[in-house]
Image (cartoon, grey):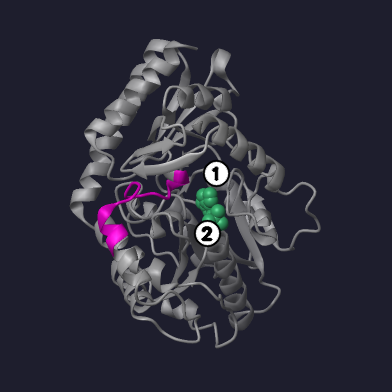
Amino acid sequence: MEQDKTKKLLETGKSTYLPVYAQKEMILDYGKGARLWDLADKEYIDLGAGIAVSVLGHQNPELVQVATEQLGKLWHTSNIYFTEPAIQLASDLVDATFADRVFFSNSGAEANEAAIKLARKFASSHASSEKHEIITFEGSFHGRTLTTITATAQPKYQEGFGPLPEGFTYCPFNDFEAIEQKISDKTCAILLEPIQGEGGVHVARPGFLAHLQALCQKHEALLIFDEIQSGMGRTGRLLAYEWEENIQPDIVTVAKALGGGLPIGAMLATERVAQTMKVGDHGSTFGGNPVIAAVACAILKQVCSSALMDNVNKQSEKLQAALSDLKEQKQLFKEIRGRGLIVGAELQGAWEGRAADLSEVCLQHGLLILQAGPNVLRFLPPLNITDEELEEGLQRMKSALNHV
Ligand SMILES: Cc1ncc(COP(=O)(O)O)c(C=O)c1O
């Protein structure tokens, strides 16, 4: 009965959706903690958290309560009016980070669009419109709008969508010398992920962010971190750049985990930079929606707690140790890398380039994991994943890999 329903829904989904995704052959129905169930009641351990989003797991009781209360009060106002949850969230983000000002969007790409617009406006008002170039890095991912695919220095996301906006230039990631050659007085900003997520889980080398900061200061360019995947506690600190000392970004973007599964993004900026924007320069109808903002306040509080960050460190050690064991036993992985609960395992040998096949085998064994490109398995579990949930997930991965 449920199988017929699943089959029918899959057919309808495949024939009605724009064919831009390769969805798995099941229909997810409900979730609890780090577990999900499909319509046929098959259980999965979720080590992907909807791509770093379901940061406190599925159906987190506190978040359900906060959302339900706000749903019973007020859903939407637009930004013509203030609401209490959005003001609270903005001031909590300011208290918790380097930022003085916050702009709310609905997604990561929109938060990056806001950052790019702000950097351009800042340069044109403080220097000239000639100073409009933005440097991004090979292997990066910044979103799917026309401007953010242009910022994304990977041709596969850009092909067929030209003409692309002008003024972006690309540099190899973690290359101290190449960036010195690229930057000039025409550069208005450097934009990067402190840990590249989609591009294969590559962590900025020690000193790289400080090097970029010094170059930005020299050329009066802004330093922008895209922390849409790496931020909100994922690495064991609120923002991943905080692992390197004495770094002071001008702008940081967050999204994904900020809403825990409800759509919200935010661009955080210093007063000096933010003051460039005037009434009417930018906006969003839904940005800072009160229901999502109320949930985001509760999430931010948790993410700022040492209890949750201790769990990230503890589960990260376990996950990385288990992957390292598999690396030794099976010669499947070339390298395990990452920080906290953003972990990548690069494939080698017979499995090189077959991350999709391996994640499919894991799915068959009741485990959801992600890819980062064709050659890296990516793990982004909920930050509050329990010992039991992670152990069960790792057990399922071992049995899945015994079948390949
Ligand atoms: C680093 C980074 N930036 C931007 C985005 C785009 O976010 P969204 O899909 O919410 O627009 C993503 C999404 O995966 C991301 O990982």
For residue 203, the mark is none
Q: Nearer the viewer, mark 1 or mark 2?
A: 2
Name the N-terminal-most of marks 1 and 2: 2
Looking at the image, residue 396 lies above or below residue 63? above
Question: Where residue 397 appears, x then y in whole percent?
Answer: 39, 22
Of 144 and 248, the residue lying toward us: 144
- The answer to whether residue 356 is left or right of residue 86 is right
Query: Residue at (35%, 49%) from the top-left corner?
Result: 55
Residue lying at the far left of the rendered structure:
307
- Determine contact: label 1, label 2, CB under 8 Å: no
- Provide the residue designation for mark 2: 108
- Provide the residue designation for mark 1: 175
- Distance from Cα at disc 1 to Cα at disc 2: 26 Å
Three-letter amino acid code at the position of disc 2? Gly
Query: Residue at (39%, 69%) from the top-left corner?
Result: 291
Question: Where residue 191 appears, x then y in whole percent?
Answer: 55, 58
- The answer to whether residue 160 is left or right of residue 284 is right
Query: From which residue to which does the magenta span run?
Result: 50-65
Considering the numbered disc 2 on the image, is that residue within a helix, a strand or a loop? helix
Three-letter amino acid code at the position of disc 1? Asp
The image quarter in which residue 338 lies = top left
Question: Where residue 324 appears, x then y in whole percent?
Answer: 35, 22
Of 21 and 317, the residue lying toward us: 21
Does the rendering let one see residue 1?
Answer: yes
Assess whether residue 363 is covered by the magenta stretch. Answer: no
Q: Is mark 2 within 8 Å of ligand 1?
A: yes
